[in-house]
Image (cartoon, grey):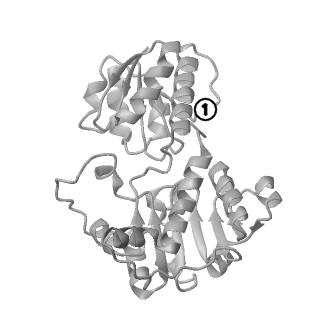
Amino acid sequence: MKVAFFSSQPYMRQPFAEHNRGYDFDITWFEVRLEAQTASLCQGFDAVCVFVNDKLDADVIATLASAGVRFIALRCTGYNNVDLDAARTAGIKVVRVPAYSPEAVAEHTVGLMLTLNRHIHKAYQRTRDANFSLNGLVGFNMHGKTAGIIGTGKIGLATLRILQGLGMKLLVHDPVENPEALALGARYVSLAQLFREARVISLHCPLLQDNYHLLCQQSFSQMQDGVMIINTSRGGLLNAVDAIEAINSGKIGALGLDVYEEEENLFFADKSCEIIHDDTFHLLSTYPNVILTGHQAFLTLEALTAIARVTLDNLQQLSRNQPCNNQIN
């Protein structure tokens, strides 16, 4: 099978190359994103392997089908960037990696919480300049505070385990109750109650049509002043413009983002010598109580290894016309 890998980076190629010794797929690496302008590169390939910021809309799907592509392998959990109806109509099967290392994302999530709370990022810069003043570095004990977790899948559950260890009270919201969350002492509540009572709110849900901009002006207004918000899920879950207004008013006291709604033209590339034409992103990056990371919550050796193994397993099952539990269309 000939497979075209898009949005490829060196840290991803190594684990795939190592695991491919047991599969012997013919892999071609493309650093560019898969989108309308690059879809013609897929001519002659049996499958494409894509990541979170590749854009597979109906036009791209049509180009893939005409090029002979039969399979789309997502090396991630989310699939909101793929037009599944178009793929189904074109007869292209789509598979994903439903879970690779929930602990990787959960640990990054809590890392953002602790850094923001204790102002570690500011203290690091100060001490490098021999400034040892403690003014402006006061945090709060997370022990005893209430955390609100939206989404209790595998990543949400992993986050709950860590926060339970910190002694936090746990409120959760999800359309489907997870018995493991209940066993940790979490209480399922309405979004309104979670917004009202949580000192720290963290998003761990997929991006769907009905939860786009789940966190916006209306939801921020229901939260307590100075709330901490963390998003390591999908950028579209949070309205960044509304978040800026909430920061300015003091409603949001700290914001940690590993994802950003307009990240597709920013993340996973070195933009340090370019002018970034995104006023919202620029403004967010100027706040001392905001931390932005470039969609790296998943980035551990264990996660990369699992992604490579599951993705190649998916492709092998498809190539052999075998049932694949990770097929989503």
Q: Is residue 268 left or right of residue 256?
A: left
Q: Position of residue 45 (x, y in %)?
A: 36, 19
Which one is in front, 109 or 219? 109
Position of residue 143 relative to residue 176, above or below, is below
Q: Is residue 203 visible?
A: yes
Residue drawn where x is 52% and y is 23% of the image: 312
Q: Position of residue 307 (x, y in %)?
A: 53, 33
Q: Quarter of the image for the C terminus: give it.
A: top right
Position of residue 36 relative to residue 196, above or below, is above
Amino acid carrying mark 1 in the image: Asn
Q: Residues within 10 Å of mark 1 (few under 14, many from 20)?
A: some
Position of residue 236 relative to residue 305, above or below, is below
Which one is in front, 190 or 227? 227
Residue drawn where x is 46% and y is 12% of the image: 24
Q: Position of residue 164 (x, y in %)?
A: 72, 63
Q: Is residue 23 visible?
A: no
Q: Position of residue 303 (x, y in %)?
A: 54, 39
Regarding mark 1 in the picture, which secondary structure is present there?
Answer: loop
Count of residue discs? 1
Position of residue 42 relative to residue 213, above or below, is above
Q: Is residue 56 left or right of residue 265?
A: right
Q: Quarter of the image for the N terminus: give it.
A: top left
Which one is in front, 89 or 234? 234
Q: Which quadrant holds residue 277?
A: bottom left
Q: Which residue is mark 1?
A: 326
Q: Which quadrant holds residue 274?
A: bottom left
Q: Which quadrant holds residue 163?
A: bottom right
